[in-house]
Image: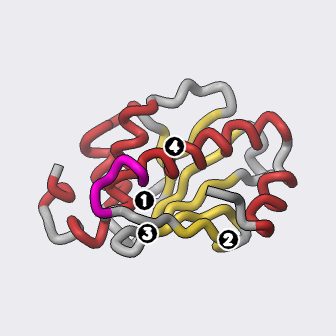
Amino acid sequence: MLYQAKVKEVFEQYPNHIQSRLLILRQLILDTAIEIEGVDYVDETLKWGEPSYITKKGSTIRIGWKQSNPDQYAMYFNCKTKLVETFKEVYRDLFNYEGNRAIVFAENDEIPVDELKHCIALALTYHNRKHLPMLGI
């Protein structure tokens, strides 16, 4: 997927050490979408000034960094969904969470790729599974 020009500009504004970490998250989102049957397109856009990814039957995923926490970056989910609540139940303390809206990483954290891709897949297909207990896991 080619960057949308405005999204690319936002990535370029992040500090280099964080930019590389966020680009890893971006690639995990795009790779996961390709692997999911029934997800034929991911829209990359900006929401709240941050790179955001949405599918036709999914819930938006945003990735970002805040100057107020310079050594952290995060993957954000819609706080009105059951996504983060479900991640906490399934993965417990494997991830660091911010309330019911984000998985937060320290800049030197090793990303548990398979587990994070599972979380991404749940978000990208959320509207197909939101009625299921534990999102059908």
Residues in magenta, as a range: 33-38
Q: Do the residues labelled 4 and 1 touch (CB within 8 Å)?
A: no
Q: Which of 11 and 18 is in front in this view?
A: 11
Q: What residue type is labelled 2?
A: Leu
Name the quarter where the N terminus is drawn.
bottom right
**Membership of 34 in magenta stretch:** yes
Label 4 to label 1, Cα distance in Å? 21 Å
Which callout, 2 or 3, points at the residue further toward the start of the chain?
Answer: 2
Q: What is the x, y in percent for residue 125?
A: 31, 63
Which callout, 3 or 4, points at the residue further toward the start of the chain?
Answer: 4
Find disc 4 in the rendering and name its residue.
28
Which one is in front in this view, the residue at disc 1 or the one at disc 3? Answer: 3
Which one is in front in this view, the residue at disc 2 or the one at disc 3? Answer: 3
Q: Do the residues labelled 4 and 2 touch (CB within 8 Å)?
A: no
Residue 125: image tag: none
Residue 46: image tag: 2
Q: Which amino acid does label 1 sit on?
A: Asn
Q: Residue at x 40, y 64 (%)?
A: 40
Instruction: Please determine whether, in this image, residue 33 is positioned above or below residue 24.
Output: below
Q: In this view, does 112 lie to the left or right of 115?
A: right
Find disc 3 in the rendering and name its residue.
55
Which one is in front in this view, the residue at disc 2 or the one at disc 1? Answer: 2
Q: What is the x, y in percent for residue 119?
A: 37, 48
Q: Which amino acid does label 3 sit on?
A: Thr
Q: What is the x, y in percent for residue 85?
A: 32, 55
Q: What residue type is labelled 4?
A: Leu
